[in-house]
Amino acid sequence: MIKVLFICLGNICRSPMAEAVFRDIVKEKGVEDKFVIDSAGLGDWHIGNPPHQGTRAKLDELNISYQGQKARQMQANDVNDFDYVIAMDQQNMDDLSQFSHQTSDVTVKKLMDFVNQPKEQNVPDPYFTKNFDYTYELVKEGCEQLFDYVSNKHDLGTK
Ligand code: 4NP
């Protein structure tokens, strides 16, 4: 199993969007059985809540499922349990540095690190910008290129 965890601050806007979009890509490629996909937030404000209305509206528009997704807070053990911990911005990366992962070979990177010539280094937070369309554009590009990276690395037999 390849275990991928998307991280943002609140786990209601960006990382649940990335979780749903990445799951949609994986499903479309027919390799669902090879992945565990999840998301979590660094903060605890929204634990148990569904994705933000703006994220839900965008995913509904595109017919991408977010069924069953509920916010949870990142746990120290997540860096041992997951192979990829994918952050949305540099602030997330700084916050993640508190979780030691010396004993695991987890890859901790920003989603935009997987994009060739990215428009942004960080995925803007639509909780503040209100621009869920632009965030989706970046998340989609990031998830597609993350999938290509992972599928090359693990030889999923999709090519
Ligand atoms: P997210 O956006 O990190 O993309 O889920 C946020 C959602 C809520 C808050 C901050 C960011 N908040 O401060 O409640």
Image: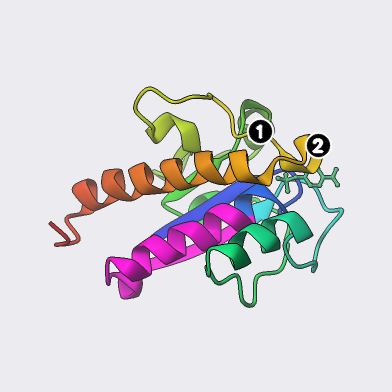
Residue 57 is left or right of residue 101, and the answer is right
Q: What is the span of residues highlighted in magenta in the rendered image?
A: 16-39
Q: Which residue is mark 1?
A: 124
* Disc 1 crowd, CA 10 A, few/some/many (<14, 14-19, 20+): many
Image height check: is 154 above or below 35? above
Image position, residue 97 (x, y; %)? 62, 32
Determine the residue positioned at 33% across, 50% down.
147
Mark linked to residue 7: none
Determine the residue positioned at 75% across, 67% down.
50
Within the image, what quadrant is residue 69 found in? bottom right
Cβ–Cβ under 8 Å for marks 1 and 2: yes
Q: Is mark 2 within 8 Å of ligand 1?
A: yes
The secondary structure type at the circle numbered 2 is: helix
- Is the C terminus in the top left, top right, bottom left or bottom right quadrant? bottom left
Q: Which residue is mark 2?
A: 128
- Is the N terminus in the top left, top right, bottom left or bottom right quadrant? bottom left
Q: Please say whether residue 110 is visible from this viewpoint.
A: no
Residue extending furthest toward the right? 45
Image position, residue 48 (x, y; %)? 79, 69
Determine the residue positioned at 38% across, 61% down.
25
